[in-house]
Image (cartoon, coloured by chain):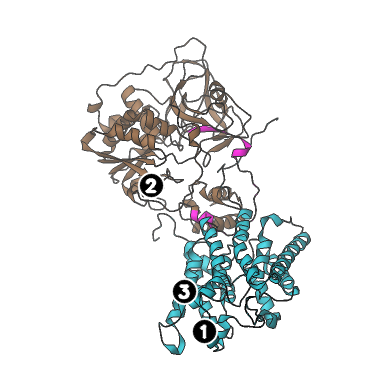
Amino acid sequence: MPYSFYGGVHPPSFKSLTSDGALKKVYVSKRVVLPLSQHTGSPAEPVVKPGDTVTVGQLIAKATGFVSSPIHATISGKVTKISYSPSPTSPRALSIFIESQGDEDQEFKSKERGNIGSLSGDELLVIIRDSGVVGLGGAAFPTHVKLSPPKNKSIDTVILNGAECEPYLTCDQRLMMDRPDEILKGLEVILKILGARKAYIAIEDNKLPAIYAMEKALSGRTFHDAAAVKISVLHTRYPQGAEKQMIKSVLNRVVPAGGLPMDVGCIVQNVGTVFAIYEAVYLSRPLIKRAITLTGSCLNEPMNVQVRIGTILKDIAEATGGFKRDPKKIIMGGPMMGVAQYTMEVPIVKGTSGALFLSKEELCEARESVCIRCGKCIEACPMGLVPTTLMYRVKKESFAEAKDLGIMNCFECGACAYECPAKIPLLDYMKYGKAKV
Amino acid sequence: MKNPLTVSIGPHIRAKVSTSRIMWGVNLALIPAGAAGVFIFGVYSLYVIMASVISAVVTEWAILALRKKEFAIFDGSAILTGLLLAYNLPPDVPLWLPVAGSFFAIAIGKQVFGGLGHNIFNPALTGRAFLMISWPVHMTTWQNPRWQVDAITTATPLELLKHNKSILLKGTTYMDLFMGNRGGCIGEVCVVALLIGAAYLILKKYISWHIPVTFVASVALFSWVFNGFNGFFTGDALFYCLSGGLVLGAFFMATDYVTSPLSAKGKIIFGIGCGVLTFLIRKYSGYPEGVSYAILIMNAATPIIDRYSFPRWFGWRKA
């Protein structure tokens, strides 16, 4: 039996819309828009100028500082402009626009690296950094930073996050089903860099095919330094995939409030990120594509597809079958933590795990009413906070009290607002309060 | 724009359960007990229930109109207050009594504090306390089940006990208490019907076990341990649990969201407090029954319980 975490909710999964079809091949668009800030940290700095011709995989913006990440051309073509464009998280993001001129070879020539066994951990880190790999689970934290813990923190366990607890999304599940060997190779690279001897592949128990696929790939396989790799089957509960909740569920270790996973000797990496590490190290391929879930009842053909990063949402939606009816809400990411979009002219960025095209029926637009103190938000909060009381504090602008009640521990999973029978937008109050503290 | 997209902060999907669904769920869960009450005491108690509910809804409507607020009968909360008040009345009260009680419950118990979600005291119990103080004779004149010969002016089992007339309880079995074959309030007598409704509420997760279980358990424990001059550990715990309004109070009134603590820890403290006070009032006060006053007193303590019973957050450590 797995361990468990406190709180959480059980939203319906809607995963069967997309979980049965294999990961579709890479879709290549005629135009891409690449925001310079697709990661946590300082934005990348362009090394090309408008008018330049670029080929797929070429470096077009370099990292600025340690917590930053470079960006590569994801199609071959011409840089048309470097200007502002809407991105999933900002209405004005400085971006590099590339347009194909029609006849370029859009295939990335991957070079298999032969001498991987002889590379040191530091050399592997440099490859990962220069390939622009960031966390693909959503936060897009530069991976090389996460894999470089301070000397005084020793990491004994690596957890691969295959929980995918957001409803609708299935791209991680498909990746585990369709590319399990590559994921394990990526894991081995991480183990070597960190010198860790233990790893868990954490998957929720509603994704049996992914569990079987990973088990099959694991059987008989040995790892660097005889590391022990196990599958950890977790209860299906949102937010199981949140780092701290996952560590509690897999290892029963509690990350201290305000602390990081490395404080309890572990590191969590999303399976998609690990696949990107595999591609960077084994195939010398920078992060130019990713798997995303395109789903929702408004689409003709919901599916998982690999897309070039920078592809405009409208282009990919039309290229994959178009719309059955007009969507009422478009969300980048999952329905719990994703960001609603006001236009379809936004690019898929490194951290985009999916795009949902939802109809009125799928959304809840019930009106807000008054808090009846039912306490369901308290039962739901995985961080053990008191959302309703925090809401009143924030309403009264008593931010110091909100801080004393631990508002900064909120990581904005939205479980409280999901569960609230009065439909109070609790998460809005949390975000506002956190910004004001 | 022809088809504007909605933009908002997540979560973009919400649980189906809503305030009104919960209120109607509780109303539904109260039906078996009410039906049993009407069956036991006769159709007149149905009129009492209806008078109480209608008065509650009309009062709610009138005051919300005065406050220029939208009237939401469909949230079911006024109906619930009316039902609960009626269930706490003797079956043969004059019909103006529930009307006055529900008026007081909604007007003073609920709306004066700001309406749904803001009242400190359970509105139905506020109404009952008002009636107890104003018309004590009506409130303590009991009727036996309609198939018993002396169907008028009897006493409840707890009253008999209080006034040292327990000899008259000789014929009463636990089964009588369980099924409702006794004198008492309309909605409190049939324990089995109440438990059916309570099971529904717990299964639907509309209420949690914390308050009812700790409430009943502490009444049972204290009644068993302290039995006056008969010596310790000799009390009849089962009798105390089945008689009076304990089951109705513990499952349907103490669990009122608005007036009980938020967290699980707080609910346990609240439940134990209710149990201890019920025991003390039953045993040592002038009243034979103490459930409603115990709940009201603990309602007053809810804010302070809340303050000291919030859960520790994940990864909490001593500063």
Circle 3 residue: B218
Depth check: give the residue in front, A152 or A162.
A162
Circle 2 residue: A260
Labels 3 and 1: the sequence-earlier one = 1
Query: To which chain does the residue with label 3 belong?
Result: B
Distance from Cα at disc 2 to Cα at disc 3:
43 Å
| On screen, residue B105 above or below A161 | below
Distance from Cα at disc 3 to Cα at disc 1:
26 Å
Chain B hue?
A: cyan
Chain A hue?
A: brown
Q: Is residue A398 visible?
A: no
Q: Is residue A345 visible?
A: yes
The structure residue drawn at horizontal position 29% and vertical position 21%, both measured from the top left corner, is: A113
Amino acid type, label 2: Leu
Between circles 1 and 2, the one closer to the viewer is 1
Give the label on residue A238, or none. Answer: none
Circle 1 residue: B170
Residue A359 covered by magenta stretch: yes
Query: To which chain does the residue with label 2 belong?
Result: A
Q: Do callouts 3 and 1 mark residues in contact (Cβ within 8 Å)?
A: no
At mark 3, the secondary structure is helix
Magenta highlight range: A352-379
Depth check: give the residue in front, B39 or A406.
B39
Residue found at the far top of this picture: A103
Few, some or many residues within 10 Å of mark 1 (<14, 14–19, 20+): few
